[in-house]
Amino acid sequence: MIRLIVFDLETTLVSESNQIAQETLGLLSELKQKDIQFAVVTGRNYDSVYPLFEKLKDDVIYICNDGGSIIYQDQVLSKTPIDRLVCLDIEKEITQHPGYDLSYATERGLYITGHEYDFIKTLKAIGAEPEFVKDSKELHGDITKITIYAKNGFDEKSFEYFYSKWEKSANVAISNPNQIDITASYVHKASALALIQQIFDITAEDTVIFGGGYSDIEMFQYSYFSYAMQYADAEVKRSAQYIAENVDTILEDILRIR
């Protein structure tokens, strides 16, 4: 019996205008009435995500910062901070390389150390309102994700350079040509989903997952009903059990079954 539906936010729910369709929100409301829970998995911070769900915002389990923090009903269920010595080392390294900027995500907020217009514009386009800080020493909360932004993008050589510096002390991944995302060691979307299933006593047989990116592949292993979006790359689609043209059609099918 389906008890949990998981969505990768960026590849399945939000439109180019950073909105969730009212039709989809309506289906989610019906699912909640049938005691089906749903979780959203994202690289964004909590403050930029929960307003997207409008009246349903307190019904969503938020796996934010690529698994670094999990929030439900405005309460932090879990957070895994990056070691502060690693944060300071990253900061020291980046200040020696012009053309790079940093952002720090706590379980709720987002902070930046530079004024690069394109980076700020990218963050605001997804609903984030970053606060400026001189350096990470000004932050008193736990840092659960760091993003390195490269104005001119990362090539293979530059990515390998940064990856090799922190691969043993953190989880380092490139999310797009201009961004490297860093979380604590062994922290990623799949590990956070596994924790949610344990907390709520939900099995893989009771879980449906929708995803469309490479970082969703590991999550598919935690569900017998994994759906890759039709527009996803071939490797992502091969990793899922099913292919979905859109989310709403599958949600309607689940409602009919229940």
Image (tube, rainbow, N blue to C red):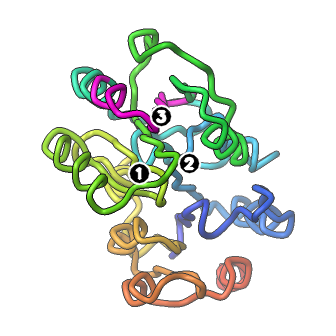
Give the quadrant of residue 218: bottom left
Q: Amino acid at mark 1?
A: Ile
The residue segment tinted magenta is 92-109
Q: Which residue is mark 3?
A: 101
Q: Which residue is mark 2?
A: 61
* Comparing labels 2 and 3, the label whose residue is closer to the camera: 3
Residue 140 rendering spot, x and y as whole percentages: 43, 11
> What residue appears at the point 51 percent right and 23 percent down from the top-left corner?
113
Q: Determine the secondary structure under disc 2.
A: strand
Q: Is tag 2's residue or tag 3's residue first in the polypeptide sequence?
A: 2
Q: Determine the secondary structure under disc 1.
A: helix
Q: Is residue 198 left or right of residue 102?
A: left
Assess whether residue 61 is covered by the magenta stretch: no
Q: Amino acid at mark 3?
A: Asp
Q: Is tag 1's residue or tag 2's residue first in the polypeptide sequence?
A: 2
Whether pointer 2 and pointer 3 mark residues with C-beta atoms closer than 8 Å, the reply is: no
